Image (tube, rainbow, N blue to C red):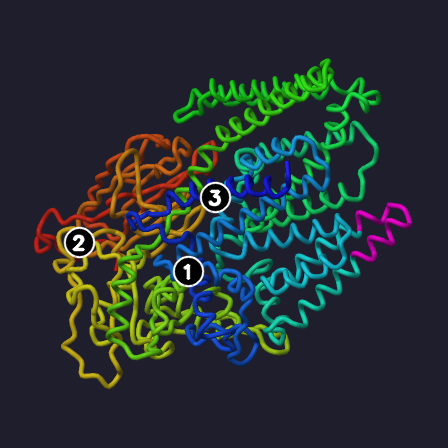
């Protein structure tokens, strides 16, 4: 089959897969898909601005983010990706769609090229049964597909990595130099990845013959020339070193503050090695054993892919973001390692040296199939188990098809043999694809659910329309979370913002400002503490700091504050400070906010005439106050961060077959504490494991009032019906919510406290506040 036809078919697989993953992206937006993740919106807006703004030298949209050690110069480390993204965005807008649609088109196209390059590398290695290996793409970890569905430089980065590998293995020095230089321009992190690939290639050739070493040296020299050319021609070359140091060590390898979850490791290595990556690791280990058992010694090319596989696996164990690269190298390494024994097995003329080897090969395949059937038979007894009969049929087709190939190849008659071989190969590939789909169906559905756009786009458009109409160009907006900047920036470039893109862009130069920002957004004000500073001579000092709500105006110069449902504690604090702020959107009275996704406060000028001082009382809050509208005094959990009116993964709160608009999303083990406002005497909630986890996960939840346990649940499992909790508070001062992991670990323990609220069942005037414990 011609390579271009195969590439079209592989591209069709990409379109189908990405269409499936995006089919769940609607979330709170109805039929509007949007884009998943946080940074996607930033990249799309930057691509759309290229024709009018060009390569910007400064970035005024972030007032307190610095990209170099000194000065205000901007380093756009994704400018090459923005150039690739730009035509898709402009075409989408020209056709009447929005720019986000163009972003999804681009991601689908880039991923199609990735799959085509994987197929091309299989062809380059003369790997037999290529379509069987293409089918095995479906067993890759769901996080691999999740990452590649984000509108980020992930798919283009892997695309150029694979192009560099292909040029190396094909011994094309000019193509190699061009690919390495282009990779440096695509994404600044490539400055480190290309040398890693060249190093793996060089080390793999050290033990080869002299002529091979010379050719390898010439290829590495060509790659080094391309790398140097890419670095020197990079438009932001002047700030490259400083920026990389900040990103690699400040955010990635040695962060000293809380950064994005993608830089953290997979906490449960056993879950990573079994549930998530078990099938892929099993395939690779089997290929390695078969290859080492068959001999001869590994070739330099096989060693190159082996080193890349192991290197990116180590990076993935260090930071989960590298899951976007490692599975591709694992699959390619397995395919190249298994090629010699499979090739000899398929061709009887070469089979003499493998005479005693065919039986073990078929035995290994059969045992693997039996093991998988047994495993899923065990799982079938649990709620939500896979369909064992269908899986068994698919594996039978796989094992039977492969086991019959040897006999069919020896059939009399060339034409008949071709037909039979094609039929057996089709059965094997079909069985592989079917088994892979059933093995990973739950994981892919989970990835689709996690890829739902987490933002209410219509609400953001309305809110930003209001702010733009009421503000002057460049007025500063104080956002309640640093990672909301991209979606706000996408919808509003009229205003400027305080922080975003990466916490280190603020913390590295002004740790005092970052401390103020964190405390204010968590409504932990007033607060007195210390800030760690590093002197130019390497010395470390600590300076005292006092954080107040008025720092929004005093230090950040903000004229507007946006609070979403996750930060109602900050909104309540602003509502209690009318001398500082007034509620401007969507209502004027905080008691009428109710379930609004966003509230906007206007920060008063210091010389502005002030209204009479007032504060919210319990009666103004109403007879019911949701915990999401209060700021927790303490919050800790096993994974992610506490979410308000969303699950811990960012999706809607769902338990069993019910969806809830209000509540808290956390992850066991967790402990969340609230100070109980005066006048409330009862706590109620509906508790369970989020429905996105299907039948996985098991927890026990507890409720304490002033440190005394008032409620303990029985074992709660994923897929079970929600549990209603009602706890009398009396005159307690502190409410504590706990979720405890069980003996099976904390995997999938996404706990929802739906409709978590405090009730006033008696008039507050009937409760003597002096009866309450505590200050």
Looking at the image, residue 660 sits to the left or right of residue 528; the answer is: left
Residue 484 position within the rendered picture, expressed as x and y whole percent measured from the top left: 38, 61
Q: Earlier in the sequence, mark 2 or mark 1?
A: 1
| Residue in the picture at 49% in, 60% down | 85
Residue 588 position within the rendered picture, expressed as x and y whole percent measured from the top left: 16, 67
Residue 428 position within the rendered picture, expressed as x and y whole percent measured from the top left: 60, 24
Q: Badge 1 local density, few (<14 within 10 Å), some, or many (20+)?
A: many
Q: Is residue 569 visible?
A: yes
Of circles 2 and 1, the one toward us is 1
Residue lying furthest top: 412
Determine whether 100 is above or below 358 in the image.
below
Q: Secondary structure at mark 2?
A: helix
Determine whether 648 is above or below 187 in the image.
above
The residue where tag 1 is placed is 41
Q: Secondary structure at mark 3?
A: helix
Please give the range of residues in magenta: 203-219
The residue where tag 3 is placed is 15
Q: Earlier in the sequence, mark 3 or mark 1?
A: 3
Quarter holding the C terminus is bottom left
Residue 390 falls within the magenta-colored stretch: no
The residue where tag 2 is placed is 771
Looking at the image, residue 404 sits to the left or right of residue 91; the answer is: right
Of circles 3 and 2, the one toward us is 3
Looking at the image, residue 269 sits to the left or right of residue 382; the answer is: right
Task: Return the residue nearer the eye: 634 or 255.
Answer: 255
CA gap between label 3 and label 2 equals 65 Å
Q: Quadrant of residue 305?
A: top right
Task: Return the residue nearer the eye: 602 or 102.
Answer: 102
Q: Earlier in the sequence, mark 3 or mark 2?
A: 3
């Amino acid at each position: 089959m011609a390579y271009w036809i195969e590439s079209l078919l592989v591209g069709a697989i990409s379109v189908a897969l990405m269409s499936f993953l995006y089919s769940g992206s609607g979330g709170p937006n109805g039929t509007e898909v949007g884009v998943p993740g946080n940074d996607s919106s930033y990249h799309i807006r930057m691509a759309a601005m290229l024709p009018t703004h060009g390569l910007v030298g400064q970035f005024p949209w972030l007032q307190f983010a610095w990209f170099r050690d000194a000065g205000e110069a901007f380093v756009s480390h994704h400018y090459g990706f923005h150039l690739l993204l730009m035509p898709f965005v402009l075409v989408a807008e020209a056709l009447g769609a929005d720019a986000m649609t163009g972003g999804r088109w681009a991601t689908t196209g880039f991923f199609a090229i990735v799959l085509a390059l994987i197929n091309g590398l299989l062809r380059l290695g003369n790997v037999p049964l290529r379509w069987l290996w293409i089918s095995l793409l479906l067993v890759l970890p769901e996080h691999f597909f999740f990452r590649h569905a984000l509108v980020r430089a992930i798919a283009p980065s892997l695309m150029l990595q694979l192009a560099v590998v292909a040029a190396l293995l094909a011994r094309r020095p000019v193509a190699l130099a061009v690919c390495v230089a282009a990779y440096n321009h695509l994404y600044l992190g490539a400055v480190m990845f290309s040398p890693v690939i060249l190093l793996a290639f060089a080390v793999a050739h050290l033990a080869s013959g002299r002529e091979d070493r010379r050719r390898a040296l010439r290829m590495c020299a060509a790659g080094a020339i391309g790398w140097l050319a890419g670095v020197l021609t990079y438009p932001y070359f002047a700030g490259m070193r400083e920026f990389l140091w900040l990103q690699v060590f400040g955010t990635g390898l040695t962060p000293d503050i809380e950064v994005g979850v993608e830089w953290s490791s997979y906490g449960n290595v056993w879950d990573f090695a079994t549930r998530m990556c078990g099938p892929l690791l099993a395939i690779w280990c089997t290929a390695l054993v078969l290859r080492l058992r068959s001999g001869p010694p590994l070739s330099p090319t096989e060693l190159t892919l082996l080193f890349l596989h192991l290197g990116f696996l180590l990076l993935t164990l260090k930071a989960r973001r590298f899951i976007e690269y490692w599975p591709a190298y694992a699959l390619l390494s397995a395919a190249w390692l298994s090629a010699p024994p499979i090739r000899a097995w398929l061709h009887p003329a070469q089979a003499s040296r493998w005479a005693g080897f065919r039986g073990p090969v078929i035995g290994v395949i059969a045992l693997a199939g039996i093991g998988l059937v047994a495993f899923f038979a065990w799982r079938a007894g649990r709620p939500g188990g896979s369909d064992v009969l269908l899986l068994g049929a698919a594996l039978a087709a796989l094992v039977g098809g492969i086991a019959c190939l040897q006999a069919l190849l020896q059939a009399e008659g060339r034409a008949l043999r071709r037909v039979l071989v094609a039929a057996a190969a089709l059965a094997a590939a079909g069985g592989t694809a079917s088994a892979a789909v059933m093995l990973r169906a739950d994981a892919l559905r989970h990835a689709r659910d996690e890829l739902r756009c987490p933002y209410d786009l219509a609400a953001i458009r309305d809110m930003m329309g209001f702010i733009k109409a009421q503000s002057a160009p460049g007025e500063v907006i104080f956002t309640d979370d640093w990672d909301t900047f991209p979606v706000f920036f996408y919808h509003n470039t009229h205003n400027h913002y305080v922080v975003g893109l990466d916490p280190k862009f603020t913390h590295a130069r002004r740790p005092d400002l970052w401390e103020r920002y964190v405390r204010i957004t968590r409504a932990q004000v007033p607060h007195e503490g210390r800030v760690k500073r590093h002197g130019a001579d390497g010395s470390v000092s600590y300076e005292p700091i006092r954080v107040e709500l008025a720092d929004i105006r005093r230090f950040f110069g903000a004229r507007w504050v946006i609070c979403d449902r996750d930060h109602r504690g900050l909104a309540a604090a602003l509502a209690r400070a009318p001398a500082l702020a007034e509620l401007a959107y969507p209502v004027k009275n905080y008691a009428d906010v109710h379930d609004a996704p966003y509230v906007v406060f206007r920060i008063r000028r210091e010389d502005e005439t002030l209204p009479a001082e007032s504060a919210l009382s319990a009666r103004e809050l109403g007879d019911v106050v949701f915990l999401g509208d209060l700021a927790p005094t303490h919050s800790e959990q096993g994974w992610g961060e506490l979410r308000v009116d969303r699950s811990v993964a960012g999706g809607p709160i769902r338990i069993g077959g019910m969806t809830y608009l209000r509540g808290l999303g956390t992850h066991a083990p967790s402990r969340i504490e609230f100070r109980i406002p005066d006048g409330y005497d009862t706590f109620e909630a509906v508790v369970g494991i989020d429905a996105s986890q299907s039948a996985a996960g098991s927890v026990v939840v507890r409720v304490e009032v002033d440190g005394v346990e008032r409620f303990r649940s029985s074992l709660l499992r994923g897929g079970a019906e929600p549990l209603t909790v009602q706890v009398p508070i009396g005159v307690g001062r502190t409410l504590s919510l706990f979720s405890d992991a069980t003996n099976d670990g904390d995997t999938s323990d996404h706990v929802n406290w739906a409709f978590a609220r405090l009730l006033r069942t008696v008039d507050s005037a009937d409760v003597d506040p002096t009866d309450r414990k505590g200050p």
